[in-house]
Amino acid sequence: MTKVSMNHLGSEAISKLLIKQAVPASIGILVMSLNILVDSIFVGNWIGSIAIAAINVVLPVSFFIGALGMSVGIGGSSIISRALGANNHEKALKTFGNQLALTLAITIAMAVLGLVYVDSIIPAFGGKGRIFEPAKIYYTIVLYGVPFLALCMMGNTVIRAEGKPKFAMIAMIIPSVGNLIMDYIFIYIFDWGMAGAAWATTIGYVLCFGYILYFFISKNSELKINLSHLRFDLSILKEISSLGFVTMARQATTSIVYLLMNNILFGLGGEAMVAVYAIIGRMLMFALFPVFGVTQGFLPIAGYNYGAEKYQRVRESINTAIKYAAIIATIVFIGLMIFPEEIASLFLSSKEGISANELAINTYVLEHTPFAMRLVFAATPIIALQLIGAAYFQAIGKAIPALLLTLTRQGFFFIPLILILPLYFNEIGVWMAFPIADVLATIVTGYYLRKEIKNDLILKS
């Protein structure tokens, strides 16, 4: 029987434990977010603003396939955390084996389909006009590396479920650093343009996969599976799917949002407006990295203690995570309200000799992005409750409420709002949808989280 040393999750002080779990997660997400941010800055300065828009079109497609791996990873990791908390090591091993086999089967099939239907997928996600050709170049190359991305996302959540946040952090840093180095070589030195940006991203995925593979075959991992663990177990697959579907549904909804936003904004302002959204999208990924880090650090703590029936510690972990995340979100909010112009200018080329068309797009983007950014992030201080509340239900294995709360913001509120508000307020209506959806989703999540704590945790304590 494999011995898994995770007792500290059930005994160490929650505040200290959350910091220990969240800081590496935050650093990993920071580096990954910086990678996306700096990558976009490189592309914008060395290739052009149309190239940023092209990458924005491709991201939801490649990320959706990669997120299938994350879905399997998070669904299985919830099982692993609770199984280890209940001292059921064999179930943890079977779950990991099923995660690996399932991720390979699904993502390879999706990547093949994505390549077959490339000419239909790119226009559907807003890759129209001058955006289409650079988007197709980037998409085709990146899709070869997406199965590696999926395996990395799956493996990273399992490493975190083992209680090894520092290794998970390193796994997130490797592809980011690799990508940025390759960006400089392929785009700036070799002048490969969009193909260079795509190969840099793909190589980053492969490097990350190599590190995660090393982790699991070395002494660092305590989940040592054999071939029998790769055999599909229907009961485990059902549990992985029900919990992982929450993450998959969230990413699918995110991809739909990108599809709608790119098309709506293209209709309102052409390629330049899509470029505005591309910059804001990068900031949505980057600026909130510490809040997402707290959420990631919270998951194994809540899952382990719930499995160990230490309900008072679960309640404490919820309160502490919300407090820390809210403080961080408020600091982020203040920074974004003060410096939106400076942030927008980072993405635009300042070199001499750019074309008149490129100059016109840059001017448009610089004029429109600051106001849009302030509206998009207007409700940032309250999102901690929304994120931690939805994550809690996923951590304890309650798939249906986790799914519904995860879909509340984008699926139930944001998508209807971006379809309705632009009809009356044009471009401003699109940006107004963000804070309105945040407020409504936070109210709903807060209500159900409070009800769950009262009916489940308090009664069991």
Image (cartoon, grey):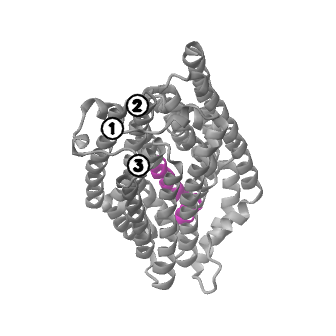
Q: Residue at x 48, y 32 (%)?
A: 394
Badge nearest the viewer, 3 or 2: 3
For marks 3 and 1, the one nearer the N-term is: 1
Q: Residues within 10 Å of mark 1 (few under 14, many from 20)?
A: many
Q: Residue 272 in the image: x percent, y percent?
A: 57, 65
Q: Residues within 10 Å of mark 2 (few under 14, many from 20)?
A: many
Closer to the chain start, of discs 3 and 2, is 2
Q: Which residues are magenta?
A: 257-277
Position in image of residue 371 (x %, y %)? 70, 55
For the residue pair 60 and 144, the one nearer the viewer reads as 144
Dividing the picture into quadrants, the one containing residue 130 is bottom left
x, y percent for residue 377: 67, 48
Question: Mark 1 = which residue?
Answer: 95
Does 460 appear above or below 24?
A: above
* Contact flag, marks 2 and 1 (Cβ < 8 Å): yes
Viewer-nearest residue: 58 or 77: 77
Q: Residues within 10 Å of mark 3 (few under 14, many from 20)?
A: some
What's the mark number on residue 83?
A: 2
Q: What is the quadrant of residue 373 in the picture?
A: bottom right
For the residues labelled 2 and 1, the Cα–Cα distance comes to: 10 Å
- The amino acid pointed to by label 2 is Ala
> Which amino acid type is shown beneath numbered disc 1?
Thr
What residue does disc 3 label? 221
- Classify the position of the N terminus by image quarter: top left
Q: Which residue occupies 49% across, 38% down?
A: 6
Residue 5: image x %, image y %? 47, 39
Q: Secondary structure at mark 2?
A: helix
